[in-house]
Amino acid sequence: MSNNSRLRILIILLIFGLIGGSLGAVFALAHSGRFGSGRAAFSEDLAVRQAAGNYLQAWQDGAPDRMYVYLSELDRARVSETEYRQHFEAFPVAPLHFKLGTVQLVAADRATIQARIMWPELAEEGALDKAEQLVLVKENSVWRIREDESLN
């Protein structure tokens, strides 16, 4: 057998191996629950994470005007931006640190994201590490925080 024949056979085997491996990975992911079952698609997961992260970062930075932008239409209808800022100034508790966790797509226009938030301890110096959940709704293709339903 010539070197050319061996090279062709090797290339064909390599291609079959790549195709089989890729199909196996897709099959394994499909049966592991990573596709479907409420898990958000990658683009939706990223969009929910970005909205939640930006909201929490604005809160951590003490910027209620930036937080207000991420609120749902329903939450913004309940409180004006001026009132929102006044509430924030009257009770200025902000996260010290946060880490976003799992995104769960509840419906096409509703999602939740788990977060670990380090809150300042009001009674004494220190911090309280707490598991929280943010609820988001998709409005006009943009994910927004349902503040009234979050962090309860």
Image (tube, helix red, strand yellow):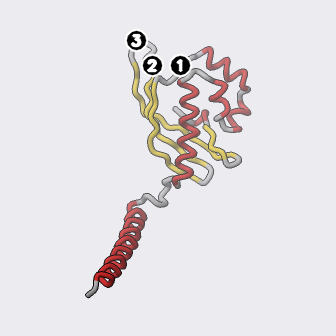
- The residue carrying pointer 1 sits among few (fewer than 14), some (14 to 19) or many (20 or more) residues within 10 Å by Cα, namely some
In the figure, 35 relative to 109: above or below? below
Mark 2 vs mark 1, CA separation in Å? 7 Å
- Where residue 124 is drawn, which disc sits there? 3
State the image coordinates of residue 12 (x, y, percent, origin top left).
36, 79
Q: Is residue 123 left or right of residue 71?
A: left
Q: Say whether marks 2 and 1 touch (CB < 8 Å).
A: yes
- Where residue 17 is drawn, which disc sits there? none
Disc 3 secondary structure class = loop
Q: Say whether marks 3 and 1 touch (CB < 8 Å).
A: no
In the figure, 86 relative to 10: above or below? above
In the figure, 28 relative to 122: above or below? below
Mark 3 vs mark 1, CA separation in Å? 14 Å
Q: Is residue 36 left or right of residue 107?
A: left
- Residue under numbered circle 2: 120
Q: Earlier in the sequence, mark 2 or mark 1?
A: 1
Mark 2 vs mark 3, CA separation in Å? 9 Å
Disc 1 secondary structure class = loop
State the image coordinates of residue 91 (x, y, percent, origin top left).
58, 16
- The residue carrying pointer 3 sits among few (fewer than 14), some (14 to 19) or many (20 or more) residues within 10 Å by Cα, namely few
> What residue appears at the point 67 percent right and 49 percent down from the top-left corner?
141
- Viewport quadrant of the N terminus: bottom left
* Frontmost residue, 142 versus 2: 2
Disc 2 secondary structure class = strand
> What residue appears at the point 58 percent right and 36 percent down from the top-left corner?
149
- Residue type marked 3: Glu
- Residue under numbered circle 1: 93
- Residue type marked 2: Pro
